[in-house]
Amino acid sequence: MKHLLLYSLTNRTELLKMKRLKEDSQLVGNVLLEIGSMLMSSGASTHRTRLTMERIAKGLGYGIELLITQRALMLTITEKDQQHFFSRLKRISPHGVNFRIVSGISHLSWNVREENWSVAQITEELHRLKSLPHYPRLVVLGLVGLAGAAFCNIFGGGAIEMTVAFVATVAGLFIRQEAMKKKFNPYLCVFFAAFTATLIAGLAEHFQIGKEPDKALATSVLFLVPGIPLINSVTDLMDGNIQNGMVRAMNGLMIAFSIAMGLFAAKMILNF
């Protein structure tokens, strides 16, 4: 009877332990999926996303298996004895660029590894990173416009051409932001922006405003160049993430095609 009681208590203890580990692994898994989704949607490469998630999981005492695609994450968590506890798929939100999120999560991962952060601390830091304010819209428009004017100057444009490039860039970016708010297709947003910027710079060339108006026209759409998708594409291909690299390369090519179509449409209207 005594042996049966001890056996029953042992089984009950093991079941409670298993239940606790399962609940803990589910909590860790949800946090890791959220981290991976934030990284991918903020412009991180596939290799960096995988490395960061594995570092955090190891710091928390878990092993993970990952499948990372452009639109989804699949995560499986195991404990040290390789027993399966958690497996889930999470859809990734549309991609953008937010390097404050990328650098913040990278710093967080090292805190988990070196300072033994708990899941509660990680969750609190993620909420803080999500709540970080974006730059004011006028600041973004102004600085991107100045970048366009600076490119125009590098290409040899004078003060008038730089002013035209500034106005065209600001107008194009404003239209793109408004189109994104209206939830248009991302490639259509790029097309609208390229069309607007080219139309304004093309009017300056049509009426011969400035000595070299073609300089403003050539630099008015440079703010739309898909640098991040193309860089991440090359990085993923070099790291062996062929599928993600090809998808990102195609995304970059589609953005470039949208820019070209915007330029073409504006030139057809202005007939030059």
Image (cartoon, rainbow, N blue to C red):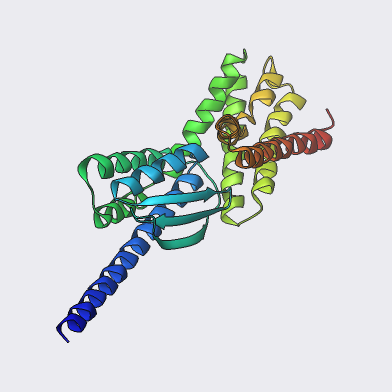
Name the residue rendered at 23%, 39% in the picture: 114
Which of these two is toward me, 250 or 177?
A: 250
Left or right, 63 with reference to 115: right
- Image quarter of residue 209: top right
- Image quarter of residue 5: bottom left
Q: Is residue 135 visible?
A: no
Which of these two is toward me, 14 or 116?
A: 14
Q: Is residue 208 above or below residue 72?
A: above
Q: Is residue 77 visible?
A: yes
Which of these two is toward me, 80 or 106?
A: 80
Q: Position of residue 92 (x, y in %)?
A: 53, 54
Q: Position of residue 93 (x, y in %)?
A: 53, 54
Q: Position of residue 20 (x, y in %)?
A: 28, 68
Left or right, 115 with reference to 32: left
Name the residue rendered at 70%, 33% in the picture: 198
On-image quarter of the N terminus = bottom left
Q: Position of residue 264 (x, y in %)?
A: 79, 35
